[in-house]
Image (cartoon, helix red, strand yellow):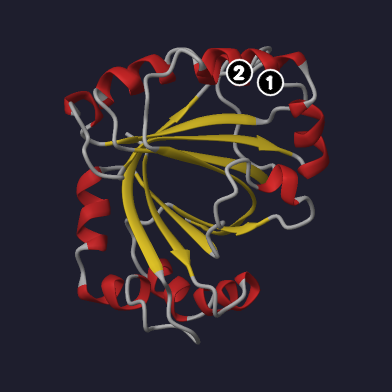
Amino acid sequence: MNIAVFVTIWSAGISSANLNEHFMAEPLAFLKTNSDVIAVEYYTPEHSDEAVHDMDNLVPPTLMVQIDFDSVEKAEKLTSSDAFKKLFMNKQGFAAPAERIDLETLEVVHYDLPGNDSPPARTAPMSFVVRYYGPVADGSDFVDYYINHHPQIAARFPGIRNVLCYLPLDWREMDEIKDDRMFVGNEVVFDDLESFKQALASDVFTDLRADGQNFKEWGYSSHHSMHRENVYSR
């Protein structure tokens, strides 16, 4: 099973570049010493086109950290450690305080693309990151429909390099969600922001919007264009 731990940080008082520099030091060194960590990716916002950058007019995260594992147990062992909490979850641990830090442990699903026998490796650096949040009447029903329809349409985008979904570990048991937790995530990957903009101008985006009309009512969603960098692979 592919497992990703996401640490998502919002901090108005520090730039993405400075926060990225902070995490390239002691936090990354700590992850490199852990033999259970398979890979680490850092996401920073693409600011070159605000209209594409966020379709929901929500503040983008200052930095997202993705840490990959091959089991839930290994991921939970790391995130429960005092060292991890100090380096990644302390809102006062940066040059300026963080307003919010989210921690999510998710199953990663890579989808096939037309013309490929298996999902290709994720190497292109531009990720459009989507998250859906509660409340929602039936989380498992929403996710089941989403993962069996929406990524398959996105895979037809011109210039698409990868399509992924991120699923909470208990998604099959999710009934009514009364709070604003994230209950499904999606990511489409392109070579650059211009390629993504061209994809949005295609008929495939029209089909995606039409499929979205079949979603049951949910709390809110976020759509952020991010530059993704692999900073460590074991």
For label 1, the SS is helix
53 is higher (above) or lower (below) than 7: above
Q: Is residue 218 left or right of residue 178?
A: right
Report x, y in % for residue 31.
40, 67
The label on residue 208 is: 2
User: Badge 2: how crowded within 10 Å, few (<14), some, or many (20+)?
Assistant: some
Q: Nearer the viewer, residue 126 or 58?
A: 58
Report x, y in % for residue 221.
47, 39
The label on residue 205 is: 1
Q: Residue 175 is drawn in which quadrant? A: top left
Q: Is residue 192 visible?
A: no
In the rendered image, the quadrant that contains the N terminus is top left
| Residue drawn at the location 53% of the way across and 79% of the way down | 22
Q: Nearer the viewer, residue 48 or 191?
A: 48
95 is higher (above) or lower (below) than 53: below
The image shows a total of numbered marks equal to: 2
Q: Is residue 164 visible?
A: yes
Q: Is residue 234 left or right of residue 72?
A: right
The amino acid marked with disc number 1 is Phe
